[in-house]
Amino acid sequence: IAGITQAPTSQILAAGRRMTLRCTQDMRHNAMYWYRQDLGLGLRLIHYSNTAGTTGKGEVPDGYSVSRANTDDFPLTLASAVPSQTSVYFCASRPSGSGTDTQYFGPGTRLTVL
Amino acid sequence: AQSVSQHNHHVILSEAASLELGCNYSYGGTVNLFWYVQYPGQHLQLLLKYFSGDPLVKGIKGFEAEFIKSKFSFNLRKPSVQWSDTAEYFCAVNPFSGGYQKVTFGIGTKLQVIP
């Protein structure tokens, strides 16, 4: 069982370009999340999905969009990348939306926008 | 909305020293509490969690945390740290009722253990 995979591992992107970060889980978890991790700011939620077909905005959603067409995949798209989106992006999942569930994290994508 | 404060942003300890990392949260209702650890170059993984019962919870690798409701605290402890405990530690809180979405993380504490 792979758990959560993310692709790419790292990427350097020119400002203004469109980029999709991929996230796939094989645990059949209902809930999925995208976080960005920045020095001194910890993890901040970008978008979430409690179940396939539904999504919601987190703490820092501007400039990002997500879709949840099926249970396994939760791609994050930057429509027009800006340097402030330079960060490490983590995808996570939970069995359900319950507050007691543990979150499982992917290995992360390191994105640099120049 | 809840918030999480981690007071120590960078901690340096010698091996065998005792560790206590502070975590305080603000939320008016019942919460579930988590500590996650991120070892260098790795993704976050659960260290321990509390959602009911004994307020002293034990996690992996000899870590424990105590939930003190009156102080809104969930401090992480380990009696004797090892070099391999060098990592970043994140406290997180989730309201007990309702779905996900509101897991809020602290900004993290970087622990450096010197051999």
Image (cartoon, rainbow, N blue to C red):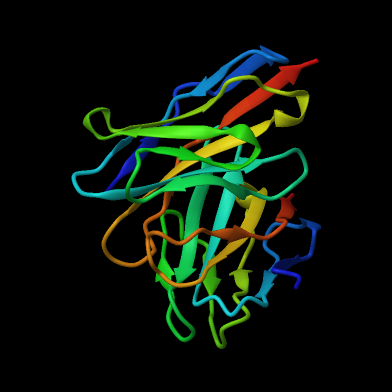
Nearer the observer, A31 or B54: B54
- Residue at left offset 67%, top offset 71%: A23
Relative image position of residue A2 (x, y in whole percent): 76, 70
> Which quarter of the figure is the N terminus of chain A placed in?
bottom right
Q: Residue B59 falls in which quadrant of the image?
A: top right
Does residue A21 sit above or below B115 in this rendering?
A: below
From this view, report whether residue A86 is shown above or below residue A97: above
Residue A36 visible to the viewer: yes
| Residue pictured at 52% horizontal, 45% vertical | B48
Provide residue A114's location: percent of width, then percent of height. Answer: 74, 49
Count all numbered tags in the image, as a single digit: 0
**Which residue is at 73% across, 68% downward?**
A5
The image quadrant that residue A82 belongs to is bottom right
| Rendered position, B1 above or below B6 | below
In the rendered structure, the answer to whether residue B23 lies left or right of residue A41 reads left
Q: Position of residue A26 (x, y in %)?
A: 67, 77
Front position in the image: A90 or B68: B68
Query: Does B19 appear above or below A16?
Result: above
- Dividing the picture into quarters, in which one does residue A19 lie? bottom right
